[in-house]
Amino acid sequence: MLNISCPFCGEREELEFTCGGEAHIARPLAENQITDAEFADYLFLRDNTKGVFLERWRHAAGCRRWFNMVRDTVSHEIIEIYPMGELPKSKQGKAAYEACWRRNTAAEAAAMPKKSRAKKGK
Amino acid sequence: MVKLKNIPGLSALSAAKASASPQPDGSKGMVVIRDTGLLDKINLRCQADNPVITKAVKRMVGTDLPTAANTFNQAGHRSIIWLGPDEWMIMAENGASDDITAELDTPEAGHVAVVNISDALGAVTIEGPHARDVLAKNCAIDFHPRAFTKGMAVQSLLSHAGVTILCLEDDKMMVIGRTSFMPYILDLLSDSSIEYGYDYQAA
């Protein structure tokens, strides 16, 4: 069993938590501008990574708050825990975030506000 | 705001009769489990620095809003428990919730949710030199007197039931659980207490 450090309550056993699956799947804001296949990337496709994985967790039996975790699915090592809405800061977490196929999908591009999309284009 | 008439209700453990098991040799003392009876409970969600709420809590509960994780503040019969970075639970004597809710749930307070959850939760106290041992049997929280000190409140699992456990005194805890889980929690606690001897006192 994992011992997970809830960012609010402190270290608790895994039983108190529920895993919310892959993190950083942004809902396309302009879903009418992408194709069904591109929308399906957002809606249906989930990674099942062997290695460093970014996932969401919720302290269900405690403070009931969501947070993100960088976890190695092979060794179960918890590399980093960081708040919702933020990106990982650890080297492995950053690398896993950048390496994810999702970063280059039309669904993710359509999830960003127009301003930052323009920046990314430059 | 519509004020609901306070109807006399039944404790979550009203069906449980007083029971006991004798204290065997080797036990440092009986475990005394008591139904707290009817207590009013109010769930409060707001930002911790909301000036209207902090003042109203001070006025109605008599203490500050606890901002440290896993703690509660108590003044007389009323207490306020930290449940999350923007969530608290106020506990007060039966019948007090209308007045407290009216003070907190005002337009001036802004973005705030105040919900009366008195009947959603029940509570028992468990005391005696073995109270910590009994809780530790079904919960992974560290109940050592150095780790779980007076004024702490943890939300965790007691076997299958989600509970909030308050440390009222060094050898006195309060276990708050869902109303429908209270008979289960009572059975769990009394069963775990047999090796120390226990006395359950109904409200």
Image: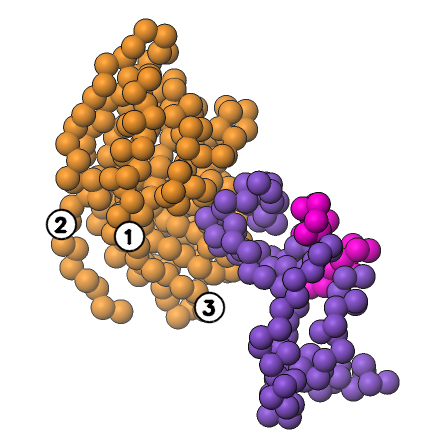
Chain colours: A purple, B orange
- Image quadrant in which you'd find residue B129: top left
* B134 vs A40, nearest the viewer: A40
Chain of the residue that carries numbered disc 1 in the rendered image: B
Name the chain under label 2.
B
Q: How many labels does the image show?
A: 3
The amino acid type, in three-letter code, at marker 2 is Pro
x and y percent of residue A64 in the render?
49, 54
Question: Can residue B66 be spotted in the picture?
Answer: no
Residue that label 2 marks: B8
Please identify the residue farthest to the top as the structure is shown: B25
Kindly identify the amino acid type of the residue bearing the numbered disc 1.
Answer: Ala
Please say if B129 is above or below A92.
above
Q: Which of B9 and B196 is in front in this view?
A: B196
**Tag 2's secondary structure?**
loop
> Residue A10: image x %, image y %?
59, 42
On screen, residue A89 versus residue B23, left or right, reads: right
Give, as a three-letter code, the residue at label 3: His
| Location of mark 1 (residue) | B120
Element type where label 3 sits in the image: loop
In the picture, residue A90 is in which quadrant?
bottom right
State which mark lies toward you, 2 or 3: 2
Residue located beneath label 3 in the image: B111
Q: Residue at x 20, y 28 (%)?
A: B201
- Residue B64, horizontal then vertical, whole percent: 47, 46
Q: The C terminus of chain A is located in which quarter?
A: bottom right
Q: Which of A26 and B115 is in front in this view?
A: A26
Between marks 1 and 3 in the image, the one whose residue lies nearer the viewer: 1
- For label 3, the crowd category at 10 Å Cα-Cα, with few meaning under 14, some 14 to 19 and many 20 or more, is few
Image-based side of A76 in relation to B178, left or right: right
Which range of residues does the magenta coloring cover? Answer: A72-94
Quadrant for the N terminus of chain A, please. top right
